[in-house]
Image (cartoon, rainbow, N blue to C red):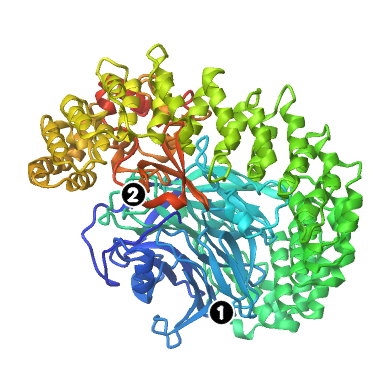
């Protein structure tokens, strides 16, 4: 679940709270289905995740408090608990509740295995057990430890019991240091998908990378691992989150430094998602088995989406060696306080949905106002009129007395839980169960059951069982063959080698992919020729990855060097990548040089990618870069490759001189991007002179880009050049603004003529974008006391709510009593504008001034409190006054008068300073959209919070876009950013106001505001949808 934090309200297991109408009144399911609440606040606190045991009890992982705890406080005094719910009379509704285990640090899911509950509670994976039947865990064992807790919920998750008998865990990019049971230590900074045996042995990572937060996992019949993920990418084109297919050795985005720091082996591009999603915060995930919900539901995935209040149905189909989905809303909600966090299938085929309620979720891109009074609950979805399932768990079956043959008959039972129990009983029978399982694999009609039989044989692991698994490599169904290949690799079954060598070349894509992984796990050099042959037809990215990763792991450079001369492009690429990533210096410049002069785009990109990993190869890199930079046309993919390569080697003096010389040519925009991203502490002198030249000449767009670079890197020697441009009265106003934007970040003081000119641009006769830009520059400048007093008396006293918050920040640098008094008096002139200011932020600002300013400000602060208490009423009044909007007119406003596109993108249009709004209508309610326009500081999208960064030379306010090992990247406005070396940063503090200016409704008529809301509600398909009012 994306970034959860607990609530502060402590409740006993049977406490009853006064709550609003249950969310079930707002939950909707398709025609032909019913939904009912089966556990409410009388049994629960704030449920997050759930897992059933063999008897049908439900273990619920709960928060218990409005949690303002830090991570350190949570580790010292953990407050979460696990509750067990019982349905005593079998009517499908839970009626008993017991605290099973308490004082846990964020239990983010679990698995019931052999009478114990395994729980992730970072830093630990725990095993909990009730030994006396009172439903209270009296055994608590740390199975493995060493992960990092984060109270926002981006932490260790699961575990999830795989068909291979391993426990799989999700993780976030928080770092780990784990001493394994075998005695060695695993340490890293990036995220991982893990697996471990229930006894704690065999811990290893499956997938890794720079991802923020993986949440839940399910397993396809073949054993393939699929899961939910938040922040697969930075928000772009309305997308951010994803459904994932996790594969062995796969390295996934984000493309962050932790990948190199952890020395993860790359096989080319980072791995793609299975399904890209919007900013929906997907959480719980279930794979549906059976037909109780309908014959077309079998094999579907269901995911809980925190932000949208929906449970989505994903229809899964094979796509090469991976999967694709078609996605449909299944459960929806008319309440903005609906936040489903888990979905699971009950034994009778119904779906159980866990709603966590309206309590505050840290980092969630919805309202930041906690609503603990909106209770969570657990809900059941059934198909209307579906026949009841008799004894869904097989409780009446005399399991202890059943022979293997009788158990084999139950493998065809229509009840999924009965089939599972029969399979487990056959595993416990060991060698005695092998003949029955082998026959079931050969003769069974259901491919999923036959794949499950393969994993049962794998877990038995005797020679006879292994022989039966090898026979399954020739099974008639792809999923069974994939399961058998997976088993052969995990078991290091060398007898399977001849068959795997054939399958990796000739079989279906998914079988080839898993056979390549198995060959890697076997570790036999004889596999290299077959893998190179397989590389001739790599199919898709997942199959290509498995082949290349196996070649890297097998460490056989000689045949790969030979393969560099193959006539097949795919083979040459695979060989070069494997040589580059293989341990030891296997790759030489002579191997790479032909790739850099190749006319084949794929070969050139592979060559330049490999060369960039070798710092001493700058001459080779320059050769390869020059060949493409000089070309008449440059494809975007090539430009991205060049940018990444040059950033990787830009500390080299020869490369720096090459970049400086190239700045005079047609590729200047690309080279400016390299200069900005280059991790050097001091800008090279050659670059300074090249930039000075471009400031004095060239087109306006390039000059503006140079000014942004000067500001971002604070290149002080160019301050006089900026000052000349800013002071040129004959220059266009946009150019003067661009120069001043950069100048105040390099030299914050403003002379009197410049201050006077900027002040004149605040006049209400000026267009809104001009006034907004002038206010932004003044807020970043270091104004004198006299200038601040003039600003207060002339503009703070009279400006509208649209500019007021930005102008007021200009006073943050002063501690003068006269300035403070002027500010208070100016704000008192018109208290009806105060509700656009953050009460906490203004209080902090005024507290910096000496007396008598705080005393003078007391009536002002009281008026502000009263105004802010009236916000909700005003919001409702404005909403009620809005009419049916015109979408097309709203779009024109978005990209025009309302200036929204100055900061926000819709699709490929607009800017990326604020959150991408491409699908805002899908993930935010009308109320949320209106609130964000009227009161932007009442809610922040995650990773767009405002921060104040104090350095040794001053302070800047903006959005932290990236945290590099040696620097912070702070965006201070659209197109304006700073690279702040960490050595100069004194503090980084959150600020309680949004960079989005409030008061936009005061610039628009009611009709225009209606049109804008209609456009935003209609996204992402404004031409195909109508306004909702």
The residue at the point 58 percent across, 33 percent down is: 687
Quadrant hosting residue 466: bottom right
The answer to whether marks 2 and 1 mark residues whose Cβ atoms lie closer than 8 Å is: no
Q: Is residue 987 above or below residue 654?
A: below
| Residue at the spot of label 2 | 990
Tell me how far mark 2 sits from mark 1, CA to CA. Answer: 47 Å
Please provide percent x and percent y for residue 175. Answer: 53, 63
Q: Is residue 654 above or below residue 790?
A: below
Rendered image: mark on residue 914? none
Q: Residues within 10 Å of mark 2 (few under 14, many from 20)?
A: few
Please provide percent x and percent y for residue 403. Answer: 69, 83
Query: Quarter holding the C terminus?
Result: top left
- In the rendered structure, the answer to whether residue 135 lies left or right of residue 403 reads left
| Most foreground residue, 985 or 33 | 985
| Label 2 secondary element | strand
Quick one: which residue is furthest to the top in this view? 730
- Asked whether residue 884 appears in the rendered view, the answer is no
Please provide percent x and percent y for residue 597. Answer: 83, 35
- In the rendered structure, the answer to whether residue 628 lies left or right of residue 888 reads right
- In the rendered structure, the answer to whether residue 984 lies left or right of residue 656 reads left
- In the rendered structure, the answer to whether residue 418 lies left or right of residue 986 reads right
| Label 1 secondary element | loop
Looking at the rendered image, the disc whose residue lies closer to the viewer, 2 or 1, is 2
| Residue at the spot of label 1 | 114
């Amino acid at each position: 679940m994306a970034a959860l934090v607990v609530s502060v309200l402590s409740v006993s297991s049977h406490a009853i709270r006064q709550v609003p109408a249950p969310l079930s009144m707002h939950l909707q399911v398709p025609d032909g289905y019913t939904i009912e609440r089966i556990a409410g606040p009388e049994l629960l606190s704030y449920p997050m995740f759930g897992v059933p045991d063999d008897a049908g009890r439900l273990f619920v992982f709960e928060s218990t408090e409005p949690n303002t705890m830090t991570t350190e406080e949570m580790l010292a005094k953990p407050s979460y608990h696990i509750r067990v719910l019982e349905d005593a009379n079998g009517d499908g509704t839970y009626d008993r509740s017991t605290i099973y285990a308490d004082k846990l640090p964020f239990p983010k899911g679990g698995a019931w295995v052999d009478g114990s509950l395994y729980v992730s509670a970072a830093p630990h994976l725990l095993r909990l057990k009730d030994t006396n039947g009172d439903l209270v865990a009296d055994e608590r064992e740390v199975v493995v430890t060493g992960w990092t807790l984060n109270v926002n919920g981006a932490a260790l998750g699961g575990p999830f019991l795989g068909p291979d008998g391993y426990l799989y865990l999700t993780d976030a990019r928080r770092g780990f240091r784990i001493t394994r049971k075998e005695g060695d230590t695993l340490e890293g900074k990036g995220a991982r998908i893990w697996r471990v045996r229930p006894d704690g042995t065999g811990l290893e990572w499956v997938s890794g990378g720079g991802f923020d937060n993986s949440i839940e996992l399910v397993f396809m019949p073949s054993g393939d691992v699929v899961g939910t993920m938040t922040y697969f990418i930075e928000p772009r084109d309305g997308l951010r989150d994803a459904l994932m297919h996790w594969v062995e050795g796969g390295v996934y985005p984000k493309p962050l430094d932790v990948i190199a720091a952890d020395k993860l082996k790359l096989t080319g591009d980072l791995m793609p998602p299975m399904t890209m999603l919007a900013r929906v915060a997907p959480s719980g995930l279930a794979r549906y088995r059976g037909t109780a919900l309908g014959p077309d539901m079998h094999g579907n995935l269901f995911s809980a989406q925190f932000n949208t209040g929906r449970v989505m149905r994903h229809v899964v189909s094979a796509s090469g060696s991976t999967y694709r989905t078609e996605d449909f809303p299944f459960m929806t909600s008319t309440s903005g306080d609906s936040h489903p966090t888990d979905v699971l299938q009950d034994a009778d085929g119904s779906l159980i949905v866990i709603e966590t309620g309206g309590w505050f979720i840290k980092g969630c891109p919805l309202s930041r106002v906690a609503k603990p009074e909106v209770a969570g609950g657990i809900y059941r979805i059934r198909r209307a009129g579906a026949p009841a399932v008799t004894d869904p768990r097989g409780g009446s079956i005399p399991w202890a007395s059943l022979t293997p043959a009788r158990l084999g008959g139950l493998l065809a039972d229509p009840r999924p839980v009965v089939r599972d129990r029969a399979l487990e009983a056959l595993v416990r029978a060991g060698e005695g169960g092998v003949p029955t399982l082998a026959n079931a694999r050969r003769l069974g009609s259901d491919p999923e059951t036959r794949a499950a039989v393969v994993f049962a044989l794998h877990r038995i692991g005797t020679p006879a069982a292994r022989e039966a698994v090898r026979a399954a490599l020739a099974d008639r169904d792809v999923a069974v063959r994939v399961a058998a290949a997976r088993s052969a690799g995990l078991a290091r079954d060398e007898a399977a080698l001849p068959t795997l060598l054939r399958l990796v070349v000739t079989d279906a894509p998914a079988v080839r992919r898993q056979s390549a992984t198995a060959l890697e796990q076997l570790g036999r050099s004889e596999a290299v020729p077959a893998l190179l042959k397989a590389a001739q037809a790599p199919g898709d990215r997942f199959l290509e990855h498995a082949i290349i990763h196996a070649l890297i792991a097998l460490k056989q450079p000689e045949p790969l060097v030979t393969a560099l001369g193959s006539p097949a492009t795919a083979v040459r690429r695979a060989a070069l990548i494997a040589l580059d990533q293989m341990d030891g210096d296997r790759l030489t410049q002579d191997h790479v040089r032909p790739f850099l002069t190749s006319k084949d785009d794929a070969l050139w990109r592979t060559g330049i990618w490999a060369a960039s990993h070798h710092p001493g190869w700058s001459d080779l890199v320059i050769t390869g870069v020059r060949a493409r930079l000089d070309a008449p046309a440059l494809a975007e993919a090539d430009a991205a490759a060049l940018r990444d390569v040059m950033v990787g080697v830009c500390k080299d003096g020869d490369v720096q001189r090459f970049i400086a010389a190239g700045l005079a040519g047609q590729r200047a925009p690309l080279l400016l991007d390299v200069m900005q991203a280059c991790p050097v502490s001091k800008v090279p002198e050659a670059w300074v002179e090249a930039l000075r030249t471009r400031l004095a000449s060239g087109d306006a767009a390039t000059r503006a880009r140079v000014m942004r670079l000067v500001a971002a890197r604070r290149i002080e020697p160019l301050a006089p050049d900026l000052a000349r441009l800013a002071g040129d009265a004959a220059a266009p106003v946009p150019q003067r603004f661009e120069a001043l934007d950069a100048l105040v970040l390099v030299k914050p003081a403003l002379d009197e003529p410049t201050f006077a000119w900027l002040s004149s641009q605040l006049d209400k006769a000026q267009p809104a974008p001009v006034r907004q830009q002038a206010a932004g520059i003044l807020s970043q400048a270091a104004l004198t006391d006299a200038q601040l007093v003039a600003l207060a008396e002339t503009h703070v006293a009279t400006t509208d709510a649209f500019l007021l918050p930005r102008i007021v920040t200009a006073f943050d640098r002063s501690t003068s009593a006269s300035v403070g008094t002027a500010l208070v008096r100016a704000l008192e002139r018109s208290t009806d504008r105060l509700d656009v200011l953050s009460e906490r932020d203004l209080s902090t600002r005024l507290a910096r001034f000496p007396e008598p300013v705080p005393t003078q400000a007391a009536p002002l602060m009281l008026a502000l409190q009263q105004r802010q208490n009236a916000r909700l009423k005003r919001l409702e009044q404005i909403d009620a006054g809005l009419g049916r909007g015109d979408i097309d007119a709203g779009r024109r406003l978005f990209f025009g008068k309302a200036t929204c596109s100055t900061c926000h993108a819709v699709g490929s249009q607009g800017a990326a300073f604020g959150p991408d709004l491409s699908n805002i209508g899908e993930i935010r309610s009308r109320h949320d959209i209106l609130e964000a326009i009227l009161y932007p500081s009442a809610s922040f999208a995650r990773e767009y919070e405002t921060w104040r960064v104090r350095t040794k030379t001053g302070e800047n306010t903006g959005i932290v876009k990236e945290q590099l090992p040696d620097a912070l990247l702070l965006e201070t406005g659209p197109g304006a950013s700073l690279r702040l070396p960490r050595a100069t940063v004194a503090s980084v503090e959150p600020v309680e106001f949004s960079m989005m200016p409030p008061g936009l409704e005061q610039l628009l008529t009611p009709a225009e505001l209606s049109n804008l809301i209609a456009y935003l509600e209609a996204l992402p398909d404004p031409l195909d949808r109508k306004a909702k009012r």
